[in-house]
Amino acid sequence: MFNGFVGFLKRAWVVVLVCGLVGCGYNDFQRLDEQSKSAWSEVLNQYQRRADLIPNIVATVKGEASFEQDTLTKVIEARAKATSIQMTPEMLNNPEAMQKFQAAQGALGSSLSRLMVVAEQYPNLKANAAFADLRVQLEGTENRITVARNRYIAAIQEYNVLARSFPTNLTAKVFGYDTKAGFTVANEAAISTPPTVDFKKP
């Protein structure tokens, strides 16, 4: 009889605990954490797409004999730096790591913009069909980056509100759900290896 009562109490405690976790946002934390990781993966996919375009852009541009080598060098160096930073989902709670990532990707974006502006001064490049196609691909990729970044920002905003609100902030403390670092226009991630470029004319 006593053992049966103890068993009942244990089952009741489990039910209360489960209901408490649901009521305090435990399941919501699981869902939003996965959602933010998924959104981050898409951000990385689009940055990878941009990084993959750069070697082709450089190869096309360097065919213009008089093109500013300094501009190309800056793009290559910026890509090398951006792709050397590994930003895993586990590091999303680290504001310092996110800031470094953002700065590197921001520098890459700036150097690419500069390259495109300089390219406008070269009629042969403007008339080059391959370069025109790469330019369109780059513009499309930048748009995809913006969309992916905005989705990530929305995902972590929802997660962070849950982590800071009462009573779900208590669940966050108990289970170690820290707020995630914000993402600004300067942000980016680790992608592939730096391209090898030979500036010598063939």
Image: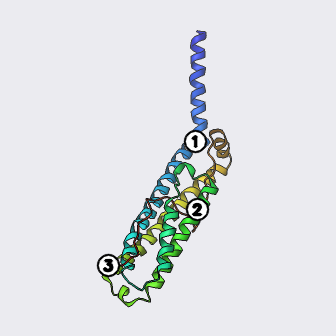
Q: How far apart are marks 2 and 3 (CA)?
A: 34 Å
Q: Is residue 132 visible?
A: yes
Q: How crowded is mark 2: few (under 14 residues within 10 Å), some or many (20 or more)?
A: some
Q: Residues within 10 Å of mark 1 (few under 14, many from 20)?
A: some
Determine the secondary structure under disc 3.
helix
Q: Tell me if 96 is positioned left or right of 144 in this view.
A: right
Cβ–Cβ below 8 Å for labels 2 and 3? no
**Mark identifier at residue 4:** none
Task: Locate the C terminus and report the quarter of the image it occupies.
Answer: bottom left
For the point 62% across and 39% down, the residue is 175
Task: From the image, tell me which residue sits under label 2.
Answer: 183
Q: Tell me if 76 is positioned left or right of 169 in this view.
A: left
Q: Residues within 10 Å of mark 3 (few under 14, many from 20)?
A: few
Q: Tell me if 11 is positioned left or right of 43 in this view.
A: right
Task: From the image, tell me which residue sits under label 3.
Answer: 130
Task: From the image, tell me which residue sits under label 1.
Answer: 26
